[in-house]
Amino acid sequence: MSIPYVLLGILGTGPQHGYELKRQHDARFPEARPLAYGQVYTTLQRLARDGHIEVLDTRAIGAPERTRYCVTDSGVKKLRLWLAESIPPAPFVTNEIFAKLVVALLSGDRTAAAGMLSRQRDAHKSRVEELVARRQAVQSSPAAALSLDYALDHLAADLRWLETVAEVLADLGEEIGNADQHHS
């Protein structure tokens, strides 16, 4: 996720200070890693340096001083250009699940591969149940619902792939068993 653009987008709704921006980000992207305050303020400094945001005012709200930022015309233009760009699909598709499977198969241990796949399916199904329950609870928040739908769709794709691999492994076992019987 491109944090500078997300912060520009949030600032497009009105002036805010860093603490508010972090809260808005974390609320609008509930399945993303929460932003660190340091990341928010470092990003704000870069956006201000580059003329995409500017300080509106600094005031004490409670004890600490809070600096509110607003988006500039340059920031609006930068955000619109980013929104108009398509995101190319990732050129490389791999993850730790695939790496574990390949290593298990390279070692010749189909039992380890099958066990890993089974445990991974269980972990994915458990996560799906958790997200489905959360999804039902966020009907009033379109951003949260979309985020959860995105995560659920990715988990569903992983589960389909895990099922396909389990079937291939089962077929390989049958082929090897049948070949052994023919050679006897």
Image (spheres, helix red, strand yellow):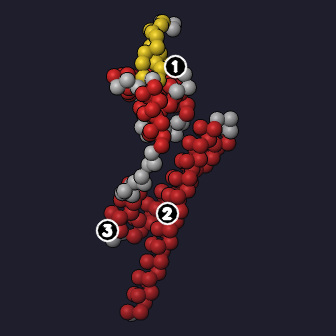
Q: Nearer the viewer, mark 3 or mark 1?
A: 1
Residue 68 at x, y = what percent? 47, 15
Is residue 109 among what the camera can see? yes
Q: What's the amino acid at mark 2?
A: Trp
| Amino acid found under the numbered disc labelled 1 | Pro
Q: CA distance from mark 3 to mark 1?
A: 56 Å
Secondary structure, mark 3, is: helix
Q: Is residue 37 visible?
A: no
According to the image, label 2 marks what residue?
161
How dense is the environment of label 3, judged by Cα within 10 Å: few (below 14), some, or many (20 and up)?
few
Residue 111 sits in which quadrant?
bottom left
Numbered disc in front, either 2 or 1: 1
In the picture, the quarter occupied by the C terminus is bottom left
Observer-nearest of 46 and 163: 46
The label shown at residue 15 is 1
Q: Residue at x 52, y 58 (%)?
A: 157
Of 136 and 56, which appears nearest the observer? 56
Farthest residue, direction left: 107
Which badge, 2 or 3, comes first in the chain's sequence?
3
**Residue 177, above or below 28:** below
Q: Position of residue 175 (x, y in %)?
A: 44, 83
Numbered badge on residue 106: 3
Marks 2/1: CA distance?
Answer: 45 Å
User: In the displayed structure, does residue 136 sit left or right of residue 158?
Assistant: right
Disc 1 is placed on an element classified as: loop
